[in-house]
Amino acid sequence: MTLFPAAIGAGILLGVAAKLYIDQHQVTSSTDNLDKYFSKDYYEAREKFRGAVRLHPMNLELHTLNINVQEPDEREKEDLTIDIAILRRSQSKLLIHVSGTHGVEGFAGSAIQNALLNSSSLMHQNEASPTVVIVHALNPYGFQKLRRFNENNVDLNRNFLSPLEFEEVLSRDPNHSGYVNMVHLINPPESLESKFDFFYLKAIYYIAKHGFTTLKSSVVSGTYHHPKGLFFGGQELQQSHILLKEFLRTQFDIEKMDEVGILDVHTGLGPSGFDSIVINNGTNADIGRQCFSGKELEYANHLTTFEKSNKAMSGYDKVIGLVPVGLAKQVFSSPTTKSYSITQEFGTVPSVIVFKAMRAENAMYQYDRSNRSRHAKDLRDVFYLEDDTKWKSQVIDRGQMVFNQLWEHLSSPS
């Protein structure tokens, strides 16, 4: 086959390029005062969040939702919680900010939330301003274990579906998006600890055979039929979503909501430090775009949708079960409520490096947990550029900017 000589050369070049890229991004300065926002792990992030809420001069409420997880090899249940801060203002407008939907990606979202709590962002609110709900670590298991998925290997950003939607996805062809065609690349059937995986050669072969866009779409669209696979959307709604839904319903008069903005923070797609603002279709997408239009010219480069996406978001048009969309449809579903479902995605390293780390970590989690630690740290390092001060500064600056822009829109007269 003529593919293999080219694949070998391309695979070697891709591997060398990946190594050079990672090495380049390890040299940074630590002069900025960013440590008070970013954390070393989930428990430090949680303590910083709780402390900032308790000390906030606006007397914020702090609520804790316990996640019930007990690992087979551990005697006691894990101390894992979703922590929620509330600043009550308008009874008809709500701004929800979510971090840690994808667990290990929570370092950035948590830092943004800490920055907001330590800045003047929440100090200028009045009774016409939206009530602010800050959801810290929606997937605490993934955050604590350095996993992208939850305690059931479920991708929470593919899982926010109704019972009817679950019935539909489970009854359709498992190869609906081409996932089965790529399954041998996506999901190694064994531990990778003591063998050479030839990942880059395999990736080049599949790209040459199917095309990069098709491969990416097949992978990120996920599966609802392979419980051990990457991007498994689950077969029922997960406890994080159930708890959050019930919490919001008990805390607020849902039927009185005129406008709700939902902002979910992620990392891993796009150029390093650059954030894509994805206006998720299916809710009030056109109005949502108005939140970021006419304020600054650079927003034109950041704004995108999954259907008409920039390069970073290409291939995501078949993805369902997104957290902001699920909340809008299942909680704020009144026909009189305008809901804006928004994802903010910060780029880190090239997507092939991200995929390689995800694939390896998941194989070790499924088949060789005793040797997973190194692979878990590799996964953390593709989603959180801990030693890159420039990246961290961009996350804090843009994270607060987008939050404030959405807050400003919701504060204006309807």
Image (cartoon, helix red, strand yellow):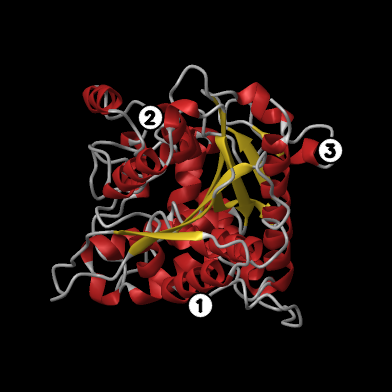
Q: Considering only order in the chain, which callout, 3 or 2, is on the residue closer to the N terminus?
A: 3
Vertical position of residue 116 compared to residue 249: above or below: below
CA–CA distance in space, label 3 to label 1: 35 Å
Residue type beneath disc 1: Lys
Q: Which secondary structure, mark 1? A: loop
Q: Which secondary structure, mark 2? A: helix
Task: Say which residue label 1 marks.
Answer: 40
Q: Considering only order in the chain, which callout, 1 or 3, is on the residue closer to the N terminus?
A: 1
- 73 with respect to 139 (left or right): left
Q: Residue at x 52, y 70 (%)?
A: 54
CA–CA distance in space, label 2 to label 3: 31 Å
Q: Is residue 8 visible?
A: no
Q: Residue furthest right?
A: 297
Q: Which mark is residue 330?
A: 2
Q: Residue at x 27, y 24 (%)?
A: 173
Q: Residue at x 46, y 45 (%)?
A: 205
Could you tell me residue 136's position as x and y percent?
47, 58
Mark whose residue sits in front, 2 or 1: 2
- 332 with respect to 190 (left or right): right
Residue type beneath disc 3: Lys
Task: Say which residue label 3 marks.
Answer: 295
Tell me where residue 79 sits by quadrant. Answer: bottom left
Can you say which quadrant of the picture contains the N terminus?
Answer: top left
Tell me where residue 17 sits by quadrant. Answer: bottom right
